[in-house]
Amino acid sequence: MDLDALRKAASGISTTLNAMATKKVSDIDAPKDDFGHDELASAVNDFCDRWNIGVSHLASDGAEVSDRLNHCVTNYEAAEQHIQLSTQGILESSSGKDPGAS
């Protein structure tokens, strides 16, 4: 398992979510008078509202994926350490290290 790749993936997701937080869809929404057409203004407003909902869900899902990737890394590292310690204990006896283990 490439734990560094998991860390980078989690970090990349977090970086993307942080960038998304600075660019709001509502920034393109404008007062109805700016459009010069009520139906167009309503369509843009509706689009922005729906898009914000979608972005919110995407951000929530992305944060969950990032958290789970980090959790996997932590669990893999703990399991690897446990295996190393267990193996070390098997190879060592009360009289010292096993001479056959190198």
Image (spheres, helix red, strand yellow):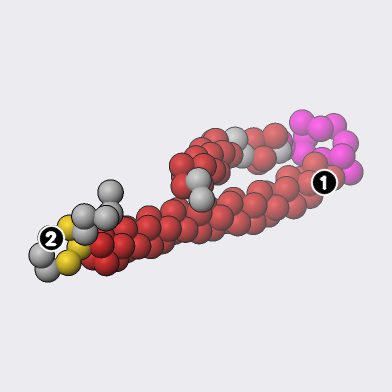
Q: Earlier in the sequence, mark 1 or mark 2?
A: 1
State the residue at coordinates (71%, 38%). 29
The answer to whether residue 4 is above or below residue 66 is above
- Is residue 10 visible to the viewer in this orientation of the structure? no
Amino acid type for the residue under numbered disc 2: Gly
Query: Which is more toward the observer, 20 or 9?
Result: 9
What is the crowding at mark 2: few (fewer than 14 residues within 10 Å), some, or many (at least 20)?
few
Q: Secondary structure at mark 2?
A: strand
Q: Which residue is mark 2?
A: 96
Q: Is the magenta region chiefly helix, strand or loop? A: helix
Q: How many numbered circles does the render carry?
A: 2
Q: Classify residue 27 as left or right of residue 64.
A: right
Instruction: Give the percent coordinates (x, y) of residue 37.
Output: 88, 36
Instruction: Give the percent coordinates (x, y) of residue 3.
Output: 46, 47
Residue 42, labelled with which disc?
1
State the residue at coordinates (17%, 67%). 93
Q: Secondary structure at mark 1?
A: helix
Magenta-colored span:
30-42
Amino acid type for the residue under numbered disc 1: Ser
Query: Which is more toward the observer, 55 or 48?
Result: 55
Numbered disc in front, either 1 or 2: 2
Query: Which is more toward the observer, 65 or 35?
Result: 65
State the residue at coordinates (82%, 46%). 42
State the residue at coordinates (37%, 58%). 80
